[in-house]
């Protein structure tokens, strides 16, 4: 009985990641608000990590990162590597030291999303020597970061609903 709920919950998370990948990578499906589309897989992987144990959180971070690299990034491995480590550490922190709440999840999602996307921009735009990178950052990345953070809020509520209803009591 214990493994049935766990298997159904993990399947629900996997289907969520696949659905978000399809939503994110389909052209003209999600609106571009002020020049930026959200990275839905980033907050999805983070919110799963808030709720699950460290090893499953690590694998969902890896899956979300790989899908994010394939659908968004030209550099395969950036999000996969970093989301794997971040989700593992985040799960450990929230299991031992912090309380999982909407405010904590939103704050951590906002901070991690901002840092990951800014570091990505720094390495693959600024250090790569692309022209007009700061203009591109202002026109596309700021709105993308804000839109991703805003999409993380309902994803947290969805994942919390899945976690609470599909676990052993």
Image (cartoon, rainbow, N blue to C red):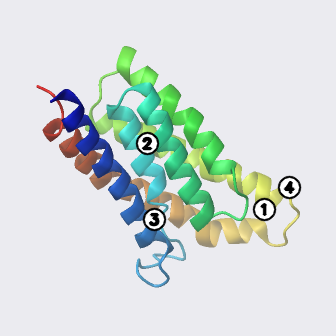
Work out whether 75 lies above or below 27.
Answer: above
Q: Locate residue 96: give its quadrant.
A: top left
Mark 2 and mark 3 in contact? Answer it, CB < 8 Å: no
Residue at mark 2: 46
Residue found at x 40% / y 36%: 49
Measured Cα–Cα span from mark 2 to mark 4: 27 Å
| Numbered disc 3: secondary structure | helix
Give residue 162's position: percent from left, percent from top.
Answer: 21, 45
Which residue has dot 3 on it?
Answer: 21
Asked whether the viewer can see residue 72, the reply is no
Q: Quadrant of the C terminus?
A: top left
Q: CA distance from mark 1 to mark 3?
A: 24 Å
Name the quarter where the N terminus is drawn: top left
- Check residue 125 in the rendering and tell me which mark sits there, or answer none: 1
Q: Residue tagged by mark 4?
A: 127
* Callout 2 touching callout 4 (CB < 8 Å): no
> Are the residues flagged by discs 1 and 4 in contact, CB closer than 8 Å?
yes
Quick check: 127 left or right of 9? right
């Amino acid at each position: 009985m214990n493994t049935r709920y766990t298997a159904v919950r993990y399947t629900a998370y996997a289907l969520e990641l696949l659905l978000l990948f399809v939503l994110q990578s389909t052209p003209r499906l999600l609106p571009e608000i002020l020049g930026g589309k959200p990275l839905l897989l980033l907050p999805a992987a983070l919110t799963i990590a808030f709720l699950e144990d460290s090893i499953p959180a690590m694998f969902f971070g890896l899956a979300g990162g790989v899908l994010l690299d394939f659908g968004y990034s030209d550099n395969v491995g950036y999000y996969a590597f970093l989301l794997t480590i971040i989700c593992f550490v985040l799960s450990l922190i929230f299991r031992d030291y912090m309380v999982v709440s909407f405010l904590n999840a939103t704050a951590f999602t906002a901070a991690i999303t901002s840092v990951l996307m800014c570091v990505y921009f720094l390495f693959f735009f600024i250090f790569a020597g692309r022209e007009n990178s700061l203009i591109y950052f202002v026109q596309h990345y700021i709105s993308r970061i804000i839109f991703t953070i805003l999409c993380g809020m309902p994803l947290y509520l969805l994942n919390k609903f899945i976690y609470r209803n599909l676990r052993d009591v």
